[in-house]
C-alpha cells in the first residue's frame, strides 16, 4: 500500500510559505463593519442593476426606508445624498416631490471609473483625455443636430449659474454644475454619448471637488464662448475652447495632488 508524500516546493522556488506568512506578506487587514449608508447605497444600486428600480421610479419615504433597512433616518439621508452626488437619484420638490431615480443613469460606468481612479489603476490623464475626446465628439454632433431650443437651454443653464456665482453660491459639490456638458450631449440626440459624457464628467467633478469645491473662475466665460461657437455651428473653435479649459483643470488637479503627496482618490 503506497503512502502519499507531502507536496514539495518546486525546484528553485524555496520552501513553501505558510498561510500566515502569505497573509502577512500581502498586508491584508481585518475587515471592519461597513458604514450603514454604504450598505443602503449598495442595495439600491443592486436593485437598479437588476431592473427592480427603473428611471422615473420614486423611492419610498425616508421614514419607510429607515424602517425597512433597520437604520436611522440620518443614515438613509446620507445614503440618498451619496446617490444624488453620483447622479443615481434626484430630489424633487412640490406636489409630486420626493427622491426619484434619474433617467439614463450610467451607474456601472461611473462607479467602475471612480473605483479605478481611487485605486490608482487609472491615471487622471486618461480620464481627462477621454473627457476631452468625448466632449469634442458631442460638440461636433451638436453643431450638426442641435435645435435652437436645445441651444437656448444651454444658455439658460449658463445664465442660471452666472447669477448663482454672483450671489456667492455655486459649488462643485452640486451636480448641477455638470448640466452644461449633459445639455451639449443631449443635443447630439445620441443616448450613449449622453451616458458616457455624464460618467466622465461626474468622475472629474468629484475629483476636483475634493481638492477645491469652488468652480474655476473662468468657467462662465468659457461656457459662453463655447455656446457662441455652437450657435455659429463652428465645431473646431468650440472644441478648441473647451479643450483648453479642460486641460487647465487637469493641470490644476494634478499639481494639487502632487503638492499634497496623494493619489487622486
Image: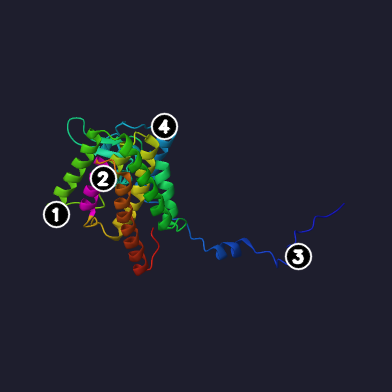
- Badge 4 marks a residue whose secondary structure is loop
Q: Is residue 145 magenta?
A: no
Which range of residues does the magenta coloring cover? 219-231
Q: Nearer the viewer, mark 2 or mark 1?
A: 2
- Quarter of the rendering containing residue 123: bottom left
Q: CA distance from mark 1 to mark 3?
A: 70 Å
Asked if labels 3 and 1 touch by Cβ distance under 8 angstroms, the answer is: no
Tell me which residue sits at (26%, 45%) in the image: 229
Residue annotated with mark 3 = 11
Name which residue lies at 57% across and 62% down.
23
Q: CA distance from mark 2 to mark 1?
A: 28 Å
**Mark nearer the N terminus (1 vs 3):** 3
Picture coordinates of residue 81, whole percent (x, y): 28, 46
Of marks 1 and 4, which one's residue comes earlier in the chain? 4
Q: Earlier in the sequence, mark 3 or mark 4?
A: 3
Mark 3 in CB contact with mark 4 (< 8 angstroms): no
Specify the label residue 168 is tagged with: 1
- Tell me the CA gap for discs 1 and 4: 41 Å
Q: According to the image, label 2 marks what residue?
A: 229
The circle drawn on residue 51 is 4
Amino acid at each position: 500500500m503506497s503512502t502519499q508524500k507531502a507536496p514539495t516546493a518546486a525546484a528553485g522556488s524555496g520552501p513553501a510559505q505558510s498561510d500566515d506568512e502569505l497573509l502577512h506578506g500581502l498586508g491584508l487587514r481585518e475587515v471592519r463593519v461597513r458604514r450603514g449608508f454604504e450598505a443602503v447605497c449598495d442595495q439600491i444600486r443592486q436593485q437598479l442593476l437588476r431592473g427592480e428600480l427603473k428611471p422615473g421610479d420614486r423611492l419610498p419615504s425616508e421614514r419607510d426606508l429607515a424602517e425597512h433597512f433597520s437604520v436611522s433616518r440620518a443614515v438613509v439621508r446620507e445614503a440618498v445624498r451619496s446617490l444624488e452626488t453620483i447622479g443615481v437619484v434626484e430630489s424633487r420638490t412640490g406636489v409630486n416631490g420626493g427622491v426619484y431615480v434619474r433617467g439614463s443613469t450610467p451607474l456601472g460606468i461611473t462607479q467602475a471609473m471612480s473605483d479605478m481612479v481611487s485605486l490608482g489603476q487609472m491615471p487622471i490623464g486618461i480620464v481627462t483625455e477621454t473627457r476631452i475626446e468625448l466632449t469634442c465628439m458631442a460638440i461636433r454632433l451638436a453643431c450638426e443636430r442641435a435645435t435652437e431650443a436645445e441651444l437656448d437651454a444651454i444658455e439658460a443653464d449658463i445664465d442660471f449659474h452666472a447669477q448663482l456665482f454672483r450671489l456667492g453660491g455655486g459649488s462643485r459639490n452640486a451636480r448641477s454644475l455638470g448640466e452644461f456638458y449633459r445639455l451639449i450631449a443631449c443635443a447630439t440626440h445620441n443616448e450613449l454619448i449622453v451616458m458616457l459624457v455624464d460618467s466622465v464628467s461626474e468622475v472629474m467633478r468629484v475629483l476636483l471637488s475634493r481638492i477645491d469645491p469652488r468652480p474655476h473662475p473662468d468657467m462662465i466665460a468659457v461656457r459662453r464662448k463655447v455656446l457662441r461657437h455652437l450657435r455659429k455651428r463652428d465645431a473646431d473653435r468650440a472644441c478648441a475652447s473647451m479643450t483648453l479649459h479642460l486641460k487647465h483643470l487637469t493641470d490644476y488637479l494634478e499639481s494639487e495632488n502632487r503638492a499634497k503627496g496623494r493619489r487622486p482618490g
